[in-house]
Amino acid sequence: MHEIEVKNLSKSFIEKDIRVDALSNINLTVEKSDIYGIIGMSGAGKSTLIRCFNYLERPTSGQVIINGKELGQLNENELRAERTKIAMIFQHFNLLQQKNVIDNVIFPLTIQGVKKSEARAKAFELLATVGLEEKANAYPSQLSGGQQQRVAIARALASNPRILLCDEATSALDPQTTASILSLLKRINKETGITIVLITHQMSVVKAICNKVAVLEAGELVESGNIEDVNLPEDKYFWIDGDSHLKKRKDQVNNRKEVADYVG
Amino acid sequence: MWDSTTINMILEGILQTIYMTVTSTVLGYLLGLPMGVLLTISDKNGLKPNPFLYKVLDAISNIVRSIPFLILLILLIPFTRQIVGQSYGSTATIVPLIICSAPYIARMVEASLKEVDPGVIEAAKAMGAGNTQIVFKVLLVEARTSLVTNATIALGSVLGYSAMAGTVGGGGLGDIAVRYGYYRYQTDIMLVTVVLLIVLFQIFQNSGMAVAKKLDHTKKS
Ligand SMILES: Nc1ncnc2c1ncn2[C@@H]1O[C@H](COP(=O)(O)OP(=O)(O)O)[C@@H](O)[C@H]1O
Ligand SMILES: [Mg+2]
């Protein structure tokens, strides 16, 4: 059985009577313990696609099958139960600003009704995993971006998910921090066998940790497969980012090397 | 003229004003908070969009807010008499004060809740949180500083309205100011009550803002 199977998935948005086809006829499969990268330029439909993986976005047509369960067939409660096994991290971390680090990590467990003492023990374990035990009582506003993303990762792992979805999880971070977050993800993947799907506009991220990759272009999957087999359009996607389009090219080449070296 | 009767009357006025203002704001919140939550979640980008419910609440809140307080107070006299048994005095003034403040509070609650980062709501959804959990564990928690700030503003406005009710025998400091200052030309008593109203306002304002500041963890400290 595939861990994630996406079949003929399409998604359109209607806005002011105009239809936007964000995704057209996407097919892909992710296996257990894959680190699956989905790369594409801004507006290609990456966020929409990854949000279909936990049905934060309902596809217009097609199926998303997680571990044999088709999400479209589930009722509201079943879907919520399924989501506890599909964790997600975000570009802007999305931590609760009014809760301290430990309470943020506990949050998904309290939602599931886990006893507070049990949840705290688990949360401290996870903070150790991400290397932030000493920040347990700090508030997100007192942490750097990289630290906040570590907290978000600890929070994501709290409910022992099978799958971790990463929506541009390193895009707000500098290259060094990016490298350390990526190596953390890789380590967690090795140690726990968790399946990771990450979307990014940075080729360096894909090259650093993914074993499989899909290329999304204007809502269509133009390539997918093992990282060695896919013909990656290097120039086109390399370190492109919304506002600093192809700027500082040389630095970026160096950064990419650094990231790759660091992650190993 | 500053005999003990006058002083007692002023002291009583202070107590009545505090009683009216605090009770009305608290009860106004009891109505306004759920109304604001419903406005937030039933709006088109809310957790559970419901155009009909939104329109109804929106209309109620706009209609009540568009009626000047003194006119509302007079309109409500039969209703107030039904509930309290009389239509003058501080307890009777609480009825129109609640009805006037609840829709304002609802609007402020709505504004506070809509300021909560959609990303945080999305993260909670992705964890499997249901709408009720999102309201109680995300929206109301993340917005609490802004909710307390707005409650403080509401308290100040209700204080002002309670004084206005004094013109029609509403009790409290406003009542004293009107009776002595306006009808009997005892300007000194009126001035004292005005100063007391200003002092009360400052106390409410400063303590509210202090609480809000203490609750806020979004600023680096
Ligand atoms: N909620 C929405 N309503 C309307 N259009 C949307 C919505 N979400 C995304 N889109 C459109 O879908 C396309 C893909 O967006 P997105 O998935 O965010 O791209 P990416 O994450 O690759 O930058 C864009 O054209 C975007 O404007
Ligand atoms: Mg995106």
Image (tube, rainbow, N blue to C red):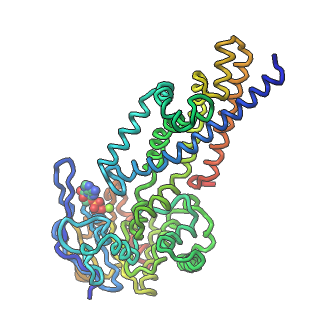
Image: B38 above or below B180: below
Image: A2 above or below A94: below
Quarter of the displayed picture in which ligand 2 can be seen: bottom left
Quadrant where the N terminus of chain B sits is top right
Looking at this view, is B81 or B74 the one in front? B81
Identify the residue shown where x is 35% and y is 61%.
Answer: A249
Residue B61 screen position, x and y as percent: 41, 38
Q: Is residue B200 left or right of residue A116?
A: right
Residue B195 screen position, x and y as percent: 70, 25
Residue B27 screen position, x and y as percent: 55, 44
Looking at this view, is A256 or B153 the one in front? B153
Quadrant where the C terminus of chain B sits is bottom right
Q: Residue furthest top?
A: B185
Q: Is residue B115 left or right of residue B180?
A: left
Q: Residue furthest right?
A: B3
Residue A136 screen position, x and y as percent: 61, 70
Identify the residue shown where x is 63% and y is 43%.
Answer: B208
